[in-house]
Amino acid sequence: MQYMAELPGIFHRLKKLKHQIVSDHIHSTDFDLLERAQFDIYSPLDPPCRRYGKPKSLDNARPTEASCSVRDNKCSHLALQTMFLSRAKDLKNTLYALGHHMNEKLTNGTTISELPSTEENSPILTTYHFKKWRDMTAYNCFWSVLIMTNKVIMQLLPPFDPAIYDLQRECRSVALEICKTWEDAWASKPIGAFHTGLSFVVAFEYCTPDVQEWIVRGLNSLLDYQMVDAFRWSDEVVAMMSSKLAGEGPDLVFSNVNLSKEAQ
């Protein structure tokens, strides 16, 4: 939760940077911040644990090739991007350190057991069973923060940077981990399923279309169980909620979600 609390500030700075790029205007306070900041875009991430493998291409990831003073108006946006990228990578370091500890508990059977799915026609073949629903919530929050941090880093990298493909692959892997918690969440509903509104919405973008349909169906089944009629989940609603979680406006949506699709 402490690491999750860092995300709003990062999202705020990223949104501010986007507005500055549009207006092509950097305030003097931003220049002062850059001159005081100490950052190294070449600093490697901490050694990862086995399950959460560090993308090697991220070690030297940087916004673009450039060499200039931060007082040069042409380079001010690049300097801000570089600083924000460094901060996002610092958060990723702490997540990998935490992930090492959590992975040990994930694999030694003390907290979680992995069994074949019992849900009929489920696209997720295996499912996690937790000894405590609070642990399930903690893992889902961790996985959600990992995906959202990756999304920040990807926005700060240039298009087609090799690190982006590695980060996307990691997001898909983590999204599958989240999906494996569904049966346990349903079994401990409603309290044990409170994490689904965050984690499954965050995972949605990195799932295949059949899993996306399964997620929407499952989230709506929770609403039915709680007898909620005023709100329904759909691809469009999930995309809107995802963008808001990432500090974006309602007009910014995930690339993998087709907002033009009409509600069935």
Image (cartoon, rainbow, N blue to C red):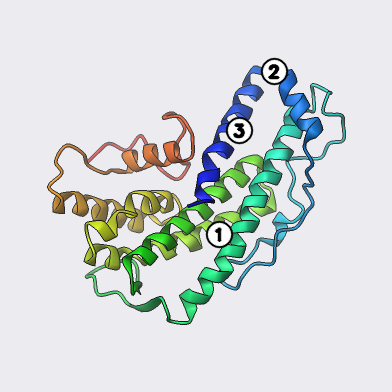
Report helix, strand or loop for mark 3: helix
In this orientation, which residue lies closer to the viewer: 2 or 250? 2
In this orientation, which residue lies closer to the viewer: 34 or 214? 34
In this orientation, which residue lies closer to the viewer: 256 or 12? 12
Query: Where residue 25 is drawn, which disc sits there?
Result: 2
Quarter the C terminus occupies:
top left
Amino acid carrying label 1: it is Arg
Residue topped by disc 1 = 169
Quarter occupied by residue 169: bottom right
Residue 144, position as x, y percentages in the image: 46, 54
Quarter occupied by residue 131: bottom left
Residue 24, position as x, y percentages in the image: 69, 19
Question: Mark 1 vs mark 2: which is more N-terminal?
Answer: 2
Distance (Cα) linking label 2 and label 3: 15 Å
Question: Mark 2 vs mark 3: which is more N-terminal?
Answer: 3
Report helix, strand or loop for mark 2: loop
In this orientation, which residue lies closer to the viewer: 251 or 185? 185
Instruction: Tell me, yes or no, whether the two marked residues, 2 and 3, touch with CB atoms within 8 Å.
Output: no
Task: Please give the name of the residue rendered at 84% of the width and 23% of the height, measured from the top-left corner.
Answer: 72
Amino acid carrying label 3: it is Arg
Residue topped by disc 3 = 13
